[in-house]
Image: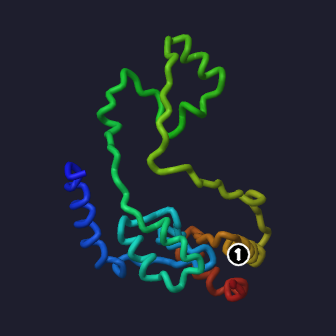
């Protein structure tokens, strides 16, 4: 075990450095599920951790946790078992990235086989599974017969999209500032929630 003392020394140095950074990173405590999350883009992610800083945050919040057993899961010393760079793999051919090979149809795969491409390697994403979801486009394009109906339709779409779960930002583009000011001074704008 003495041959691994450098590993232990390195982890202790990281702990000593990160214990003072608990309050530097804003976090969110989900008391229903006993999880600590961090803001990522427009949402809170409970999959993101910041090394020992997250572990010390659990210690800081331990009195507010319902399940005290959660500490046994988060208070651990991660030991790196190795790493490699995808850039150093040096394959003969790279045919697809970001899941494109797995998305090939049978006819596409047959074409590749005709060219002698019969071996495929799938490497899991370092970013985890995709949670990308396409928004529905609604009913499509609307044509309104007058300005009042046009402004009402804009307001209705804003309210409908802003009240969905998860909460979403709504951005409306106008042709120019004059059209924007006209909408802002309309009665339907004042009724936006």
Q: Residue at x 68, y 88 (%)?
A: 190
Q: Is residue 147 visible?
A: no
Query: Element at badge 1?
Result: loop
Q: Is 1 or 44 nearer to us in this picture?
A: 1
Residue 188 placement (x, y as % from top left): 72, 84
Picture coordinates of residue 162 (x, y %)? 67, 74
Along the line of sight, the residue nearer the viewer: 42 or 178: 42
Q: Residue at x 48, y 81 (%)?
A: 62
Q: Compared to 41, does 31 lie above or below? A: below
**Quarter in which the C terminus is drawn:** bottom right
Q: Please tell me in which quadrant of the rendered image residue 18 appears.
A: bottom left
The crowd level at tag 1 (other Cα within 10 Å; few <14, some 14-19, many 20+) is: few
Q: Residue at x 75, y 78 (%)?
A: 148
Specify the farthest residue to the front. Answer: 1
Q: State the image coordinates of residue 163 (x, y, percent, origin top left).
A: 70, 75
Judge from the rendering whether residue 89 lies leftward or rightward of residue 159; answer left or right: left
Position of residue 138 in the picture relative to residue 182 (left or right): right
Q: Is residue 122 at least partly visible in the picture?
A: yes
Pointer 1 residue? 163
Give the side of residue 61 with respect to residue 183, left or right: left
Q: Relative to the observer, which residue lies in front, 92 or 46?
A: 46
Quarter of the image where one finds residue 142? bottom right
Which quadrant of the view contains residue 12? bottom left
């Amino acid at each position: 075990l003495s041959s691994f003392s450098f590993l232990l020394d390195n982890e202790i140095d990281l702990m000593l450095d990160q214990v003072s950074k608990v309050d530097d990173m804003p976090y969110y405590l989900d008391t229903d599920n006993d999880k600590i999350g961090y803001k990522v883009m427009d949402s809170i992610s409970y999959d993101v951790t910041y090394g020992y800083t997250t572990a010390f945050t659990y210690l800081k919040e331990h009195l507010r946790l319902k399940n005290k057993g959660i500490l046994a899961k988060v208070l651990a010393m991660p030991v790196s078992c190795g790493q490699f760079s995808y850039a150093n793999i040096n394959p003969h051919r790279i045919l697809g990235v970001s899941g494109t090979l797995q998305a090939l149809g049978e006819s596409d795969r047959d074409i590749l086989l005709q060219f002698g491409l019969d071996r495929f390697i799938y490497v899991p994403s370092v970013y985890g599974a995709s949670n990308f979801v396409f928004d529905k486009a609604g009913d499509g394009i609307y044509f309104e017969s007058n300005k009042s109906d046009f402004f009402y339709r804009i307001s209705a779409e804003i309210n409908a999209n802003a009240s969905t779960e998860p909460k979403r930002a709504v951005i409306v583009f106008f042709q120019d500032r004059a059209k924007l000011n006209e909408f802002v001074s309309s009665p339907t704008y004042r009724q936006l929630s």
